[in-house]
C-alpha cells in the first residue's frame, strides 16, 4: 500500500513538472519572434528590419530578372537604330524564342513534377535521384 502511495506521489509530481515545463515553453516559444508593436515608430522599425531580410533573400533573383529582361530590350534598342525592318525581325525573334523556351521549360517542369511524385510514391528514391539528374541536364542544355 505504501509503494502504491509513493508511485501516485511520483506520478503527480512528474505531471506537475511536465505542466510547468510546457507552460515555460509556451511563454518562451516566441523568443525568436518580433517584439509586440507598440506604435507607429515600432511598426516602421520592424518593417525596416524585415525588409532588409527580404531583400537579402530576394535581391539576387530580382537582379537576375532585370538583367534577363533588359537583354532583349537593349538588343531591340540597338537594332532600332539600324532599320525598321531589322527592328521588326528582332522583335518577332525575341517573342518567338521567349515563347518557345517558356513552353519547353513549363513542359519539362510539369513532367518532372509528375515523374518525381510517382517515383517517391513508389518508394524508388534511387530513381528519384536519377530523374532529377536527367532533368537538370535537360534544363542546362
Image (spheres, rainbow, N blue to C red):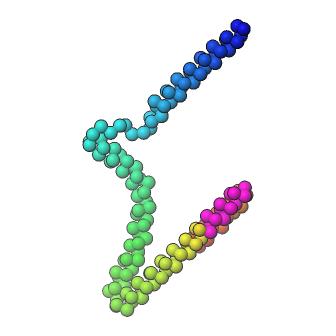
Give the extent of the magenta segment: 111-123
Tell me which residue sits at (37%, 81%) in the image: 76
Which is nearer the eye, 63 or 100? 100
Counting from the top left corner in percent of width and height, residue 78 is at 35, 82
From the viewer's perspective, is residue 20 above or below residue 40?
above
Counting from the top left corner in percent of width and height, residue 127 is at 71, 61
106 displayed left or right of 44: right
Which is nearer the eye, 46 or 133? 46
Which is nearer the eye, 96 or 79? 96
Could you tell me which quadrant the N terminus lies in?
top right
* Secondary structure predominantly adopted by residues drawn in magenta: helix
Tell me which residue sits at (39%, 88%) in the image: 88
Could you tell me which quadrant the C terminus lies in?
bottom right
139 displayed left or right of 2: left
Counting from the top left corner in percent of width and height, residue 31 is at 44, 35
Q: Visible in this render: residue 78?
A: yes
Amino acid at each position: 500500500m505504501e509503494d502504491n502511495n509513493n508511485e501516485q506521489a511520483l506520478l503527480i509530481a512528474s505531471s506537475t513538472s511536465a505542466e510547468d515545463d510546457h507552460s515555460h515553453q509556451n511563454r518562451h516559444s516566441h523568443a525568436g519572434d518580433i517584439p509586440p508593436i507598440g506604435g507607429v515608430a515600432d511598426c516602421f522599425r520592424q518593417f525596416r528590419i524585415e525588409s532588409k531580410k527580404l531583400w537579402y533573400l530576394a535581391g539576387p533573383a530580382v537582379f537576375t530578372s532585370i538583367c534577363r529582361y533588359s537583354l532583349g530590350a537593349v538588343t531591340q534598342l540597338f537594332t532600332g537604330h539600324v532599320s525598321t525592318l531589322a527592328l521588326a525581325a528582332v522583335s518577332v525573334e525575341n517573342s518567338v524564342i521567349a515563347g518557345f523556351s517558356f513552353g519547353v521549360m513549363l513542359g519539362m517542369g510539369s513532367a518532372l513534377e509528375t515523374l518525381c511524385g510517382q517515383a517517391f510514391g513508389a518508394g524508388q528514391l534511387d530513381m528519384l535521384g536519377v530523374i532529377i539528374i536527367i532533368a537538370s541536364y535537360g534544363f542546362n542544355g
